[in-house]
Image (cartoon, rainbow, N blue to C red):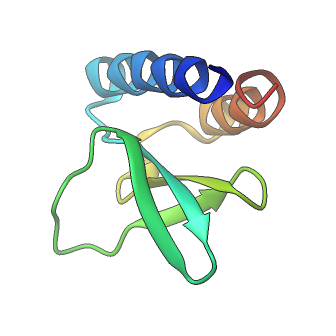
Amino acid sequence: MERETFISKFTALAERIKQTYGVNLWLVEVLGKRHSYVAGHKEDSFLPPEPIYLNERFAVVSNEWEKIPEEERKQLISFLKEDLLK
């Protein structure tokens, strides 16, 4: 149940980020060296995606982090780490 709640919250957040900044975010589960897509707006691009690790199990990925202002990006990552992962 917790995983489904976490995924639904992340999906809603990813949708808001896409509407506000035009940035695709997706959540991946870290399985050793492999990253497995879980939720969000995944985009195929020529640019390499940049993961930001939330903990040892999950990372949030985008290839457009620079479109989100730095302070808001920090707040987003902090929110994901502290509130969403509870």
Q: Position of residue 31 (x, y in %)?
A: 59, 71
Q: Position of residue 51 (x, y in %)?
A: 54, 63
Camera-side residue of 32 and 71: 32
Q: In the figure, is residue 32 to the left or right of 20?
A: right
Q: Quadrant of residue 46?
A: bottom left
Give the position of the N terminus as an image quadrant. Answer: top right
Q: Quadrant of residue 6?
A: top right
Compared with residue 28, is residue 13 higher up or lower down, i.e. above or below? above
Q: Position of residue 45 (x, y in %)?
A: 17, 66
Q: In the figure, is residue 35 to the left or right of 41?
A: right
Query: Which residue lies most toward the bottom here?
Result: 33
- Residue at 42 percent across and 15 percent down: it is 12
Q: Position of residue 65 (x, y in %)?
A: 45, 51
Q: In the figure, is residue 9 to the left or right of 12?
A: right
- Residue at 78 percent across and 21 percent down: it is 83
Give the position of the C terminus as an image quadrant. Answer: top right
Query: Which residue lies most toward the front here?
Result: 1
Q: In the figure, is residue 39 to the left or right of 13?
A: left
Compared with residue 85, is residue 57 higher up or lower down, i.e. above or below? below
- Residue at 70 percent across and 24 percent down: it is 84
Camera-side residue of 3 and 56: 3
Compared with residue 46, is residue 72 higher up or lower down, i.e. above or below? above
- Residue at 73 percent across and 26 percent down: it is 79
Camera-side residue of 72 and 57: 57
